[in-house]
Amino acid sequence: MAIRKLSTGKWLCECYLNGREGKRVRRQFKTRAEAIAFEQYTLDEMKAKPWLAEKEDKRRLNELVELWYKLHGRALSDNKGRLAKLYIISNGMGNPVASEITAKDWAHYRDDRLEGKIQNGYKTSLKSLKVSPGTVNCEHAFLRALFNELERLGEISYPNPLKNIREFDQPEKEMAWLTGEQIQKLFAACKIHGNDDLTLIIKICLSTGCRWSEAASLKATQLSPNKLTFINTKGKKNRSVPISDELYKELKERKDRYFKECYRQFYLVIRLAGIELPEGQMSHVLRHSFASHFMMAGGNIIVLQRILGHSDIRVTMRYAHFAPDHLEDAIRCNPLALMAKNNGGKVAAEVPAE
């Protein structure tokens, strides 16, 4: 239902008695109050005569997944991956009627996932691999986003069934970064491997804090005097980062698309350099290393946010503890330090003898 003012000065009340596909009722009024009263009258009529009201939504979850993909999902950068993940979720839940999904249904689904009772999107009695709470949280976010988007598009009229369900708390992951000595070993390993493209990509990542994919896909048009512009980024926004004269000259000598695929070779040189990284971290260690050294050198956290392209400062704050003066007030302002200052260098004043 909608009420809006027309160019004639009158107010239009527009109602659909059976959803967008049903009968439409339109009436014009001199005042907005009359239009509102008519809207309320129509609502009351629909309640008194249920056969006029919107039909119950019996579409199954797979149907909504297809609809979401058609209207929104196909425009995402990882559209096929997201679609496949949503089908796994839907099939794992038994492809239920979407409007009938409850918090309890989701709680039992994620329990089955954690216990390894769902394999390739279907329940099974066979022993399958258990997933981590992080994987379940990711699925939670995907399905919640689907319902939110369809609600925004007016395709569903019921509330998001996952709206008030909390995700699992996850401990902060270990964030590895390379020391100066490790960086030297890495370049030495690259020299042994003899891959110039690999060496230059590592230089770009360590010089600008960019992601591996951003560096590996660079083209000549993204290079300007002492500056690189990264496009098609994760945050959907282009950003430019200054570079040294030396790096600019190296890149200027190349033409068209700069690099051949060499991501797998990075694994080899990391092992060759004897560097051990936490599980799930590989090339991203170069981005972490840039940010860590930037802060240790006294860099500004806001400037770092812009260089890395983070839309949320909270993500950049992970590197704040590398700043030389980070939380140093804890040394100066703790109660023992204050007591020592007030008592001439002693932690506590002498207790007078009785």
Image (cartoon, helix red, strand yellow):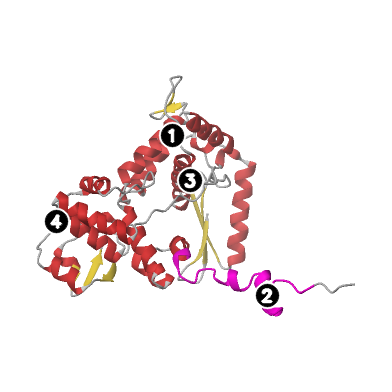
Q: Disc 1 or 2, which lies upstream in sequence?
A: 1
Residue 46 location (% of width, % of height): 60, 45
Q: Disc 1 or 3, which lies upstream in sequence?
A: 1
Residue at image coords 23%, 68%: 228
Using a 10 Å C-alpha cutoff, classify the residue at mark 2 as few (fewer than 14 neighbours), some (14 to 19) or many (20 or more).
some
| Viewer-side label of 4, 1 | 4
Question: Foreground: 85 or 159?
Answer: 85
| Viewer-side label of 4, 2 | 2
Separation of disc 3 and disc 4 at Cα? Answer: 45 Å
| Residue type at the position of mark 4 | Asp
Q: Is residue 331 magenta?
A: yes
Quarter of the view holding residue 211: bottom left
Helix, strand or loop at label 4? It is helix
**Quarter of the figure that contains the C terminus:** bottom right
Residue at image coords 43%, 35%: 89
Disc 1 to disc 3: CB gap under 8 Å: no
Disc 1 to disc 2: CB gap under 8 Å: no
Q: Which residue is mark 1?
A: 90
Residue 261 location (% of width, % of height): 17, 49
Residue 235 in view in this figure: no
Residues drawn in magenta: 321-350
Helix, strand or loop at label 3? It is helix
Question: Foreground: 277 or 303?
Answer: 277
Q: Disc 4 or 1, which lies upstream in sequence?
A: 1
User: Eyeballing the image, is 118 above or below 125?
Assistant: below
| Residue type at the position of mark 1 | Ser
On residue 340, the disc is: 2
Residue 98 in view in this figure: yes
Separation of disc 2 and disc 3 at Cα? Answer: 55 Å
| Viewer-side label of 2, 3 | 2
Q: Which residue is mark 4?
A: 196
User: Eyeballing the image, is 347 above or below 72?
Assistant: below
